Amino acid sequence: MKNILYIIVSLLALTSCEKEIDLDLNDQSGNIVIEGNVTNQSGPYTVKITKSVSFSSPNQYPAVTGAQVILSDNTGQTETLHYVGNGIYQTTTFTGEPGRTYTLKVESEGKQYSAQSKMPEVVNFDGLQQSSFKFGDKTTYTLLPLFTDPLPLGNRYLFSFTINDLTKKYMNTFSDNVNNGLPNQQPLILPNDENKGRDHEVVVGDKIHVEMQSIDTNVFTYYSALLQISGGNGGTATPTNPPSNISNGALGYFSAHTTDTQTFVIEQMTTP
């Protein structure tokens, strides 16, 4: 898998690192890639199955057809997903609930793969607070996600945002290792380097669409490694691969998470 994720590293991103992560540097093109999500929002939920490509290959990922894909949870709910095209398998009646543990099983080309993910409880996403700082002659805007971390240690978060109607996605992982049980203090730094040809320069009037996910520890490790791999310039799953929570050598991830979104329009900052 060589999906590009454009990532902004927050001012406190180093606090989200729990341990040194060993990364596989071998070319694993041709391996199965499984990307599955179950959320606390209404379905359908999807599992995408493709084959990985080498780092130097074009962004064309062969779809895997004919797989058997089964979702279940610890309450006895189970469903076999149906194929809808482009490597995507989809639920019909399956429901996601916080606190439940979900299991994904995939059988494809004579091999079996499985993963588990426990959906955390909901952490309320109360809004976004704008700030800014000068970097050279440019103004860099930041948005502080407003939420209070629950008291038990071990909560993990994934924040992603897009700008206006652009498709490029930026991502951050947050943990409560430093700020357990307190209001969040980690900002999202918005891009301002359009002149480098990579990003959009955020200006007054831009709409920032932010998604907050409460994720489990294994998924947090996956995305934190993806940040480490990319160095802030985009990530790949081959030839350098984040540690997957899926068995039998599969690439990708399976995540049961809660989700909420907020939209914020960048405002003109007043001078004190």
Image (cartoon, rainbow, N blue to C red):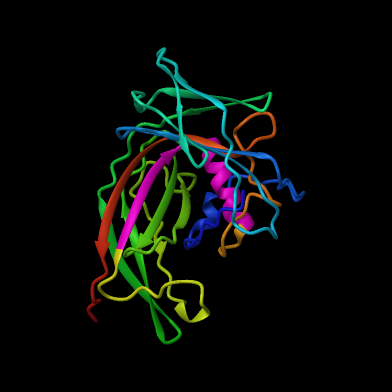
For residue 112, above or below residue 258: above
Please state if 106 lies on the left or on the right of 149 as rendered.
right
Please state if 16 lies on the left or on the right of 152 as rendered.
right
Residue name at image x 33 percent, y 63 percent = 165
Q: Residue furthest right?
A: 26
Q: Residue furthest top?
A: 76
Q: Is residue 36 visible?
A: no
Is residue 225 highlighted in magenta?
Answer: yes
Is residue 253 highlighted in magenta?
Answer: no
Residue 61 or residue 70, whichever sits in front: 61
Residue 144 or residue 210, whichever sits in front: 210
For residue 28, above or below residue 92: below
Please state if 142 lies on the left or on the right of 6 as rendered.
left
Position in image of residue 75 (x %, y %): 40, 14
Q: Where does the C terminus fall, quadrant-wise?
A: bottom left
Residue name at image x 41 percent, y 60 percent = 167
Position in image of residue 109 (x %, y %): 67, 28
Position in image of residue 84 (x %, y %): 44, 35
Please state if 161 lies on the left or on the right of 8 as rendered.
left
Q: Is residue 125 visible?
A: yes
Q: Which stretch is magenta? A: 208-229
Residue name at image x 63 percent, y 49 percent = 237
Position in image of residue 259 (x %, y %): 34, 41
